[in-house]
Amino acid sequence: MTKEQIFSAWAPDASLWSRWAKPVTFAHMDLGRTPIALPEMAAAVDWAPPPVERVALVLDLPEAESVTLASALAERGYQPVPLFNALPLPTENPADEAAYTNVAAVDMFPIIDALRLRAERLQELNVAADAPPAFLLDARRQGDKQSVNTTDFDNRSISFPTDFPSANFLASQRIQRALLIQKDRIDPQADLAHTLRRWQEGGIKLERINLNSMTAPEAFEAVRPAWYGMMFQRILSSFGLRRAWGGGYGAWLQDSAGGG
């Protein structure tokens, strides 16, 4: 499949939610590399509400786990919505891959491979156009490292409320609940908290589940985050991150000794 076909499989024209799918990562699927084979999917999604309950899911999981889980949720009738907004290392030389994880703030190749290898099955499922959404985020989006070094490729990213539909739009689609799925944490990440708080204030009831504990989903309230509602919150949140000229996040850090 071409990268355009892969994107169409994950963001079909008929879906209500495809307008929010991010094309950035898909645009870089033509790198000169062979995708790494994925293990057979063993993702259990019996915790997920039946699609008829009209619940929006937010999968904030590391590496390709949100993609793998979304594939299983699509089998149940959910529409995955990829929100990955970071570039991989911008190279077309497969020999550069060995050094990739040593210089990139976030390794995007596992996500790219999973999106590519799950696309054909997703296309076959032909999920209903009005299926409830499962929004996909990479929990490592702000970086695996404690800091980003000079000459690193800084592709750390952040999510904003505008990356998601509003509470009013969710309600117009008969969605009154949202379920946050995470691992190794209970509270939402700081950037995502802005979105969830807006949904909450718009009448959306919030629930969460930690996949490591596998307890039943529990209701929670999103605490008002710092700079919430401020016009310059977007600027403050993304301070220090690097936008690529063509869209998304990703740019080389320059040695300060070189000037500039």
Image: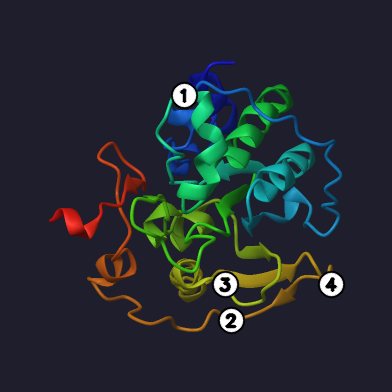
Which circle, 2 or 1, is nearer the viewer? 1
How far is disc 2 from disc 3 in space, using C-alphas? 10 Å
Q: Secondary structure at mark 4?
A: loop
Query: Crowding near pointer 2: few (<14 within 10 Å), some, many (20+)?
Result: few
Name the residue carrying label 2. Answer: 221
Label 4 near label 3: C-beta < 8 Å?
no
Which mark, residue 215?
Answer: 4
- Amino acid tagged 4: Thr
Image quarter (top left, top right, bottom left or bottom right) of the C terminus: bottom left
Query: Crowding near pointer 3: few (<14 within 10 Å), some, many (20+)?
Result: some
- Amino acid tagged 2: Glu
Q: Is residue 17 visible?
A: no
Name the spot of residue 16 as percent of width and height, x first: 52, 39
Q: Earlier in the sequence, mark 4 or mark 1?
A: 1
Name the residue carrying label 3. Answer: 188
Name the residue carrying label 1. Answer: 93
Residue at 56%, 43% in the rendered image:
81
How far is disc 4 from disc 1 in space, using C-alphas? 45 Å
Residue at 40%, 34% in the rendered image:
90
- Amino acid tagged 1: Asn
Label 1 near label 3: C-beta < 8 Å?
no
Front position in the image: 155 or 260? 260
How far is disc 3 from disc 1 in space, using C-alphas? 37 Å
Q: Earlier in the sequence, mark 2 or mark 1?
A: 1
Q: Residue furthest left?
A: 260
Q: Is residue 87 visible?
A: yes
Q: Earlier in the sequence, mark 3 or mark 4?
A: 3
- Amino acid tagged 3: Pro
Q: Residue furthest top?
A: 1
